[in-house]
Image (cartoon, rainbow, N blue to C red):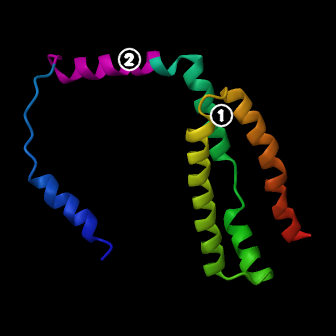
Protein backbone atom coordinates (compact mmCIF):
# COMPACT_ATOMS: atom_id res chain seq x y z
CA UNK A 1 0.00 0.00 0.00
CA UNK A 2 2.87 2.37 0.74
CA UNK A 3 4.44 1.92 -2.68
CA UNK A 4 1.28 2.73 -4.65
CA UNK A 5 1.93 6.48 -4.83
CA UNK A 6 5.53 6.18 -6.12
CA UNK A 7 4.34 3.65 -8.70
CA UNK A 8 1.64 6.08 -9.82
CA UNK A 9 4.25 8.82 -10.16
CA UNK A 10 6.43 6.55 -12.30
CA UNK A 11 3.46 5.51 -14.43
CA UNK A 12 2.30 9.07 -15.00
CA UNK A 13 5.85 10.28 -15.61
CA UNK A 14 6.31 7.77 -18.39
CA UNK A 15 3.27 9.21 -20.18
CA UNK A 16 4.57 12.79 -20.21
CA UNK A 17 5.83 14.18 -23.47
CA UNK A 18 8.95 16.27 -23.29
CA UNK A 19 9.94 18.76 -25.97
CA UNK A 20 13.71 18.91 -26.55
CA UNK A 21 15.28 22.30 -25.87
CA UNK A 22 18.19 23.92 -27.60
CA UNK A 23 21.09 24.64 -25.30
CA UNK A 24 22.65 28.10 -25.37
CA UNK A 25 26.06 26.50 -24.75
CA UNK A 26 28.16 24.97 -27.48
CA UNK A 27 29.59 22.07 -25.51
CA UNK A 28 29.43 20.47 -22.10
CA UNK A 29 32.64 21.97 -20.70
CA UNK A 30 31.51 25.51 -21.55
CA UNK A 31 28.22 24.89 -19.80
CA UNK A 32 29.88 23.42 -16.69
CA UNK A 33 32.44 26.21 -16.42
CA UNK A 34 29.76 28.88 -16.87
CA UNK A 35 27.50 27.35 -14.24
CA UNK A 36 30.43 26.82 -11.84
CA UNK A 37 31.33 30.47 -12.27
CA UNK A 38 27.76 31.56 -11.49
CA UNK A 39 27.64 29.21 -8.49
CA UNK A 40 30.92 30.56 -7.13
CA UNK A 41 29.80 34.18 -7.56
CA UNK A 42 26.61 33.41 -5.61
CA UNK A 43 28.29 31.32 -2.88
CA UNK A 44 31.13 33.79 -2.31
CA UNK A 45 28.74 36.49 -1.15
CA UNK A 46 28.81 36.96 2.60
CA UNK A 47 25.01 37.00 2.80
CA UNK A 48 25.03 33.42 1.44
CA UNK A 49 28.05 31.69 2.96
CA UNK A 50 27.62 33.02 6.51
CA UNK A 51 24.11 31.56 7.04
CA UNK A 52 25.21 28.39 5.22
CA UNK A 53 28.18 28.06 7.58
CA UNK A 54 25.91 28.59 10.58
CA UNK A 55 23.48 25.89 9.39
CA UNK A 56 26.33 23.49 8.68
CA UNK A 57 27.87 23.97 12.12
CA UNK A 58 24.46 23.70 13.77
CA UNK A 59 23.66 20.43 12.02
CA UNK A 60 27.19 19.07 12.56
CA UNK A 61 26.92 19.25 16.33
CA UNK A 62 26.03 16.01 18.07
CA UNK A 63 22.42 15.54 19.11
CA UNK A 64 20.99 13.56 21.98
CA UNK A 65 17.71 12.59 20.31
CA UNK A 66 18.15 8.81 20.41
CA UNK A 67 19.60 8.81 23.93
CA UNK A 68 16.76 11.04 25.12
CA UNK A 69 14.22 8.73 23.47
CA UNK A 70 15.65 5.72 25.33
CA UNK A 71 15.65 7.72 28.56
CA UNK A 72 11.99 8.60 28.10
CA UNK A 73 10.96 5.04 27.24
CA UNK A 74 13.19 2.98 29.54
CA UNK A 75 13.65 5.22 32.58
CA UNK A 76 10.39 7.18 32.63
CA UNK A 77 8.21 4.42 31.16
CA UNK A 78 6.64 6.44 28.36
CA UNK A 79 5.44 4.35 25.45
CA UNK A 80 6.63 4.89 21.91
CA UNK A 81 2.99 5.37 20.91
CA UNK A 82 2.61 8.23 23.37
CA UNK A 83 5.79 9.87 22.11
CA UNK A 84 4.48 9.49 18.56
CA UNK A 85 1.30 11.28 19.59
CA UNK A 86 3.39 14.03 21.14
CA UNK A 87 5.26 14.32 17.82
CA UNK A 88 1.93 14.67 15.99
CA UNK A 89 0.94 17.40 18.43
CA UNK A 90 4.25 19.13 17.77
CA UNK A 91 3.62 19.02 14.02
CA UNK A 92 0.11 20.42 14.46
CA UNK A 93 1.51 23.21 16.63
CA UNK A 94 4.04 23.99 13.87
CA UNK A 95 1.22 24.23 11.34
CA UNK A 96 -0.72 26.49 13.70
CA UNK A 97 2.38 28.67 14.08
CA UNK A 98 2.70 28.96 10.32
CA UNK A 99 -0.96 29.98 10.11
CA UNK A 100 -0.56 32.58 12.88
CA UNK A 101 2.50 34.02 11.17
CA UNK A 102 0.83 34.20 7.76
CA UNK A 103 -2.37 35.64 9.21
CA UNK A 104 -1.18 38.22 11.76
CA UNK A 105 2.61 38.46 11.91
CA UNK A 106 3.58 38.80 8.25
CA UNK A 107 3.70 42.58 8.41
CA UNK A 108 5.63 42.67 11.70
CA UNK A 109 9.40 43.17 11.26
CA UNK A 110 11.32 39.88 11.28
CA UNK A 111 13.67 41.13 14.00
CA UNK A 112 10.72 41.65 16.36
CA UNK A 113 9.19 38.26 15.58
CA UNK A 114 12.50 36.46 16.14
CA UNK A 115 13.14 38.30 19.40
CA UNK A 116 9.75 37.36 20.83
CA UNK A 117 10.04 33.80 19.49
CA UNK A 118 13.41 33.39 21.23
CA UNK A 119 12.02 34.79 24.48
CA UNK A 120 9.02 32.46 24.32
CA UNK A 121 10.94 29.35 23.27
CA UNK A 122 13.61 29.57 25.97
CA UNK A 123 11.32 28.73 28.91
CA UNK A 124 9.34 26.25 26.83
CA UNK A 125 12.55 24.45 25.83
CA UNK A 126 13.62 24.23 29.43
CA UNK A 127 10.49 22.30 30.40
CA UNK A 128 12.25 19.09 29.35
CA UNK A 129 14.49 19.53 32.40
CA UNK A 130 11.43 18.92 34.57
CA UNK A 131 11.40 15.32 33.31
CA UNK A 132 15.01 14.79 34.32
CA UNK A 133 14.93 16.31 37.81
Instruction: Name which residue lies at 79% across and 55% down.
Output: 125
Inter-mark Cα distance, 2 to 1: 22 Å
Quadrant where the image shows the N terminus:
bottom left
Q: Quadrant of the C terminus?
A: bottom right
Residue 6 is situated, as x and y percent measured from the top left of the image, at 26, 63
Rendered position, 10 above or below 74:
above
Which SS class for mark 2? helix
Q: Does 57 appear in magenta?
A: no
Query: For residue 39, what is the image quadrant?
Result: top left
- Say left or right for 38 vs 59: left
Looking at the rendering, which quadrant does residue 87 occupy? bottom right
Q: Is residue 35 magenta?
A: yes
Magenta part, dominant SS: helix
Q: Secondary structure at mark 1?
A: helix
Label 1 belongs to which residue? Answer: 54
Residue at left offset 10%, top offset 48%: 16
Q: Nearer the viewer, residue 121 or 26?
A: 121
Looking at the rendering, the stretch of residues picked out in magenta corresponds to 24-41
At x 60%, y 73%, the residue is 84
From what the image shows, is residue 46 above or below residue 16? above
Q: Nearer the viewer, residue 99 or 52?
A: 99
The mark found on residue 38 in the picture is: 2
Disc on the earlier residue, 2 or 1 = 2
Q: Decide if residue 54 is on the left or right side of residue 133.
A: left
Amino acid sequence: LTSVFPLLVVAMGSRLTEVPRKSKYEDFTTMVSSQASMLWSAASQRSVWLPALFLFLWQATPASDSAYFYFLTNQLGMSAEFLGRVRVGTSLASLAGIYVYRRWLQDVPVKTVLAWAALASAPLGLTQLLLVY
